[in-house]
């Protein structure tokens, strides 16, 4: 099909009954003037514009990408593609960064690779000599390839020896990792997308799947439109497209997620909806969980969350009486207050009911980005590769032997550094060398005025690798042009552990290079070597890097040892762990009720969920967890910043279906940008009436940190809440001018969805607010009245 999918976001329905296979539907788009007969080659890969990772093929003609089509046999999408998958790649063909840049006289000027890299290496060597490894930091993306992450991991942790490595995954998926580690002993999704096909209840916690993972929502819609649909529960302060289909919608006040989760757990225990045999055999911590939730009744939570107690009870009854429940959890929980504790309660609901390890019963703690899982697995962020425990000397020795370096080189003397601390150290000057790759923190980070001061200051030398000139590149000392999706070969792994191989389809523009090639060049120029003098890293090609990663992952929870490029080319997506014993991958984890919590295996010894204080090996060992899951929570506490007389409303931020992160690619795709061309903010009808605001009026939203101006859109967001999409980085419109520097004590994920703001009408607008053609929050007026769908 090649129709206009901007308006028809999810495409035609193909309903299917419980337990049946999701029917295939191949979506295809070719640019105007190109017919299938004109396509010279279809190159296999997968979409890299959300965490779904839909299998596809890239159409190539005369060395150019001219279209895409879904792969019908792929386990993730069965041929479907969403709007960003169909059209987003066109953004790569415009305004690309094709030449290195270097700052001279306060301006970025074009230069050659040798000059640019010489400047990078000179500053790097000087700082290593004068200040040591702690002077260096790397801040990467959730959109690179596994081979690139692992290459940089080895450079940073074995070549330099710095613990200062993190990614913008800190903003989107850090809590998913922390929640799994705290509950199950290690990162890694226990469920599978196929669980949607056989569940009888769906719970979506802070997850606007209709816009953030459109093909996954298509799968859910096809179940909801069948004759035996699952019941659906949605926790979200906005009336999203998901909420419109929900059996129960809990529009909680943002920042109060843990209160409603503690109430749901309370109800399961109080009503006897607990699988006692499973809890007794496969968990620890039930008595403490019971104690902490004994008084957290639906009535108690209703006062805090602003939702009826009867609706909380109805949601609990659905979870407690269903036979097969799938839960998804996403940014509404991760970027909010007490993020890890609330997300662990999602895990606890499933553990209390024994809802794991079988068809239709699973958890998907969602990723915000397409290859965030790889960043976490490969150790490019604040972790050791293969879900190893930095606090376990045996795990460190394993890596030292694998890399042939002294164990003392590998940073493990204290917890790895998260992005918040990296930026603080760069602000203070103790980090003097910061390399940013594939991300745009000058738009995506919190409190943007501070971020701009850090990146533009003289105290830190900033290198940026990117495919475009962005708000961040304009603050850098050296900018390196990077190859993007389908301009290089490598693998990436989606939310449900499905690994895809993206094969190179076209050449990158100008002098652009893949990130792995850039970092390998840096390592060679720096002379990084192992104990025997061999180059570190020891590989040059992507396939060599993949083979090295397989060796690092072997025997660990994320085992890739059974995968090859050839298998991924032939089959499409394959789930890890994939080994000689499981050559076709593993659909679900923990099917035997044994978790990765043994002292010898676990990725962490855990933390106190209220304070973030580490538990430590001695206390962890004394608890005798030994392969059982851990039921953990903490008491609800109010957010860092709540409404007051000056700032009486609550801000929450989020995405629109048509854009990806800071729009560096999608704003250059005509179809996507025309669908959502500019910033807007959403307020409720009662708030609009009280403030004298009409649809399209220009309003100022202000917080203690800054303000923005944008057209108002009157929607079904809950009263007292303001919603702002965060994609738009233009002056006076970036939502993160408003957000605060608070973060979860365990995951260190910023509270992007909880801030106190005021809203003031500035002037009449020029017409309706520039909202998407179809939006997350359905307009108060009917769609038919606007000509929109």
Image (cartoon, rainbow, N blue to C red):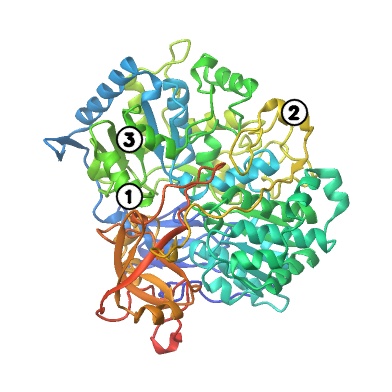
Q: Earlier in the sequence, mark 2 or mark 3?
A: 3
**Residue 115: % across, % down:** 19, 28
Q: Residue furthest left?
A: 105
User: Can the viewer see residue 481 in this picture?
Assistant: no
Packing grade of label 2 (10 A; few <14, some 14-19, many >=20) is some
Q: Which mark, by number, is residue 621?
A: 2
Packing grade of label 3 (10 A; few <14, some 14-19, many >=20) is many
- Residue shown at 72% from the left, 36% from the top: 597
The residue at which mark 3 appears reads as 427
Residues at marks 2 and 3, CA–CA distance in whole angstroms: 38 Å
Q: Which mark, by number, is residue 448?
A: 1
Secondary structure of the residue carrying numbered label 2? helix
Secondary structure of the residue carrying numbered label 3? helix
**Residue 37: % across, % down:** 38, 65
Q: Which mark, by number, is residue 674?
A: none
Residues at marks 1 and 3, CA–CA distance in whole angstroms: 13 Å
The answer to whether 31 appears left or right of 500 in the picture is left
The answer to whether 548 appears left or right of 755 in the picture is right
- Residue shown at 52% from the left, 13% from the top: 406
């Amino acid at each position: 099909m090649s129709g206009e999918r901007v308006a028809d976001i999810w495409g035609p329905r193909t309903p299917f009954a419980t337990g049946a296979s999701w029917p295939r539907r191949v979506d295809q788009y070719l640019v105007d003037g190109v017919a299938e007969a004109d396509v010279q080659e279809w190159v296999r890969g997968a979409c890299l514009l959300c965490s779904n990772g839909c299998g596809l093929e890239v159409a190539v003609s005369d060395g150019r990408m001219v279209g895409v089509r879904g792969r019908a046999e792929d386990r993730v999408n069965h041929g479907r593609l969403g709007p960003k998958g169909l059209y987003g790649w066109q953004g790569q063909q415009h305004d690309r960064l094709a030449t290195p840049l270097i700052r001279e006289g306060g301006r970025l000027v074009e230069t050659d690779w040798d000059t640019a890299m010489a400047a990078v290496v000179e500053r790097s060597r000087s700082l290593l000599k004068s200040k040591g490894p702690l002077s260096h930091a790397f801040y990467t993306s959730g959109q690179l390839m596994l081979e690139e992450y692992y290459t940089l991991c080895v450079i940073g942790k074995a070549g330099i020896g710095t613990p200062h490595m993190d990614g913008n995954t800190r903003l989107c998926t850090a809590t998913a990792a922390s929640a799994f580690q705290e509950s199950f002993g290690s990162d890694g999704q226990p469920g599978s997308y196929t669980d949607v096909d056989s569940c009888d209840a769906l719970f979506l916690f802070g997850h606007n799947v209709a816009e953030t993972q459109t093909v996954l929502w298509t799968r859910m819609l096809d179940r909801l439109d069948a004759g035996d649909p699952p019941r659906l529960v949605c926790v979200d302060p906005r009336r999203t497209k998901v909420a419109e289909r929900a059996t129960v919608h809990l529009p909680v006040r943002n920042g109060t997620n843990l209160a409603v989760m503690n109430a749901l757990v309370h109800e399961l225990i109080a009503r006897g909806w607990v699988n006692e045999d499973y809890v007794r055999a496969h968990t620890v911590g039930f008595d403490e969980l019971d104690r902490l939730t004994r008084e957290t009744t639906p009535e108690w939570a209703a006062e805090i969350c602003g939702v009826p107690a009867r609706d909380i009870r109805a949601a609990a009854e659905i979870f407690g009486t269903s036979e097969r429940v799938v839960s998804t959890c996403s940014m509404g929980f991760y970027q909010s207050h007490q993020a890890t504790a609330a997300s662990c309660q999602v895990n606890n609901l499933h553990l209390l009911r024994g809802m794991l390890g079988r068809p239709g019963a699973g958890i998907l703690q969602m990723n915000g980005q397409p290859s965030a899982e790889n960043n976490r697995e490969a150790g490019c962020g604040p972790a050791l590769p293969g879900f190893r425990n930095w606090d376990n000397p045996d795990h460190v020795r394993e890596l030292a032997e694998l890399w042939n370096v002294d164990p003392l080189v590998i940073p493990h003397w204290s917890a790895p550094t998260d992005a918040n601390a990296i930026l603080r150290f760069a602000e203070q000057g103790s980090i003097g060398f910061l390399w940013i790759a594939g991300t745009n923190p000058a738009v995506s980070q919190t409190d943007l005025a501070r971020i701009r001061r850090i990146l533009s200051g003289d105290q830190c030398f900033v290198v940026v690798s990117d495919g475009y000139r962005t708000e961040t590149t304009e603050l850098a000392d050296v900018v390196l042009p990077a190859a993007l999706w389908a301009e290089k070969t490598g693998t990436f792994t989606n939310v449900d552990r499905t690994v895809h191989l993206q094969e190179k389809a076209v050449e990158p523009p100008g002098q652009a290079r893949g990130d792995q090639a850039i970092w390998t060049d840096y390592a060679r120029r720096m002379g990084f070597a192992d104990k025997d003098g061999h180059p570190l890293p020891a590989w040059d090609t992507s396939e060599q890097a993949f083979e090295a990663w397989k060796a690092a992952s072997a025997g660990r929870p994320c085992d890739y040892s059974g995968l090859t490029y050839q298998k991924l080319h032939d089959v499409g997506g394959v789930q890890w762990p994939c080994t000689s014993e499981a050559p076709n991958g593993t659909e679900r984890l923990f099917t035997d009720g044994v978790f990765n919590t043994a002292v010898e295996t676990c990725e962490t010894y855990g933390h106190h969920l209220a304070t973030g204080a580490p538990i430590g090996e001695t206390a962890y060992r004394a608890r005798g967890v030994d392969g059982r899951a851990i039921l953990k929570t903490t008491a609800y506490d109010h957010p860092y910043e709540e409404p007051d007389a000056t700032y009486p409303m609550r801000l929450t931020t989020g995405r629109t279906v048509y854009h990806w992160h800071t729009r560096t690619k999608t704003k250059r795709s005509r179809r996507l940008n025309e669908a959502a061309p500019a910033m807007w903010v959403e307020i409720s009808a009662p708030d609009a009436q009280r403030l004298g605001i009409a649809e399209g009026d220009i309003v100022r939203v202000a917080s203690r940190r800054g303000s923005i101006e944008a057209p108002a859109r009157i929607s079904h967001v809950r009263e007292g809440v303001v919603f702002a999409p965060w994609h738009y980085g233009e002056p006076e419109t970036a939502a993160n001018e408003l957000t605060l520097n608070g973060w979860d004590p365990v995951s260190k994920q910023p509270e992007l969805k909880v801030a106190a703001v005021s809203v003031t009408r500035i002037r009449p607008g020029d017409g309706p607010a520039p909202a998407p053609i179809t939006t997350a929050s359905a307009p108060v007026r009917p769609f038919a009245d606007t000509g929109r769908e």
